[in-house]
Amino acid sequence: MDMHPHDIKIELNMNDKERSEVVLHLKKTLSDEYVLFTKLFKFHWNVEGPFFGPLHSLFQGLYEQNFKTVDLVAERIRALGHKAPGTLKEFLDMTRLEENPGVNPQDCYMLEEVFHDLQKIIRELRDDEKKIEKLNDRVTSNMLLGIIEQHEKSAWMVRSHLEKNENTKK
């Protein structure tokens, strides 16, 4: 068997155009996830105030979970036969999130920003998942649904830190 490694393709029931379209969505997702990962690290390092301990731990748990998502998405891009972006410039060029260089908000504003980013990512993932499902890539579609589920749980946890408890006003 005299096959060059570049001639070997995994059969995915998608043509090259469909595969490239799926990968484009995944590259944007990877960029969003990496920007969120970086922001969570920044907040973990820079949180201050009376809730330092719990928020420091919350941000750590979120970035650890997010790192798994970053790796999952990058590996799916590779499984589809494409190279995953891996530089900060590439991520910043493709992300749908906003960064605020040099700004270190107070703890509640950190939480609001993370919650906002999670909500934006969830909306983008839902749109991407619908488009990818139409391209007949159920594996990627299911992967995105799992990421949505995880982000919805994370958003709930972050939102819970922002909610005021009416029962404690006695």
Image (cartoon, rainbow, N blue to C red):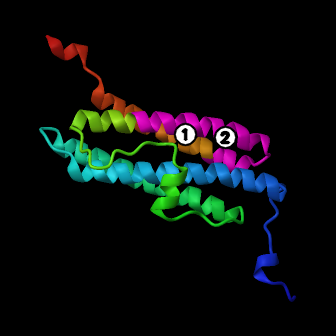
Label 2 residue SS: helix
> Is mark 1 in CB contact (under 8 Å) with mark 2?
yes
Which callout, 1 or 2, points at the residue further toward the start of the chain? 2
Give the side of residue 25 with respect to residue 40, left or right. right
Residue type beneath disc 2 = Glu
Pick the residue in front: 17 or 118: 17
Give the side of residue 108 with respect to residue 146, left or right. left
Give the side of residue 164 with respect to residue 36, left or right. left
Residue under the image location 65 percent in, 48 percent down = 25
Q: Which residues are magenta?
A: 116-143
Residue type beneath disc 1 = Ile
Q: Mark 1 = which residue?
A: 148
- In the depicted structure, whether residue 75 falls above or below residue 46: below
Rendered image: mark on residue 129 = 2
Q: Position of residue 83 (x, y in %)?
A: 64, 67
Quadrant showing the C terminus: top left
The crowd level at tag 1 (other Cα within 10 Å; few <14, some 14-19, many 20+) is many
Residue 148 falls within the magenta-colored stretch? no
Tell me the quarter of the picture where residue 14 sits: bottom right
Examine the residues drawn in magenta and state their main secondary structure: helix
Residue under the image location 72 percent in, 44 percent down = 132
Tell me how far mark 1 sits from mark 2, CA to CA: 10 Å
The crowd level at tag 2 (other Cα within 10 Å; few <14, some 14-19, many 20+) is many
Between label 1 and label 2, give the one nearer the viewer: 2
Residue 125 falls within the magenta-colored stretch? yes
Residue under the image location 76 percent in, 81 percent down = 5
Pick the residue in front: 104 or 38: 104
Q: Position of residue 148 (x, y in %)?
A: 55, 39
Label 1 residue SS: helix
Residue under the image location 44 percent in, 56 percent down = 67
Q: Position of residue 48 (x, y in %)?
A: 16, 44
Q: Position of residue 36 (x, y in %)?
A: 42, 48
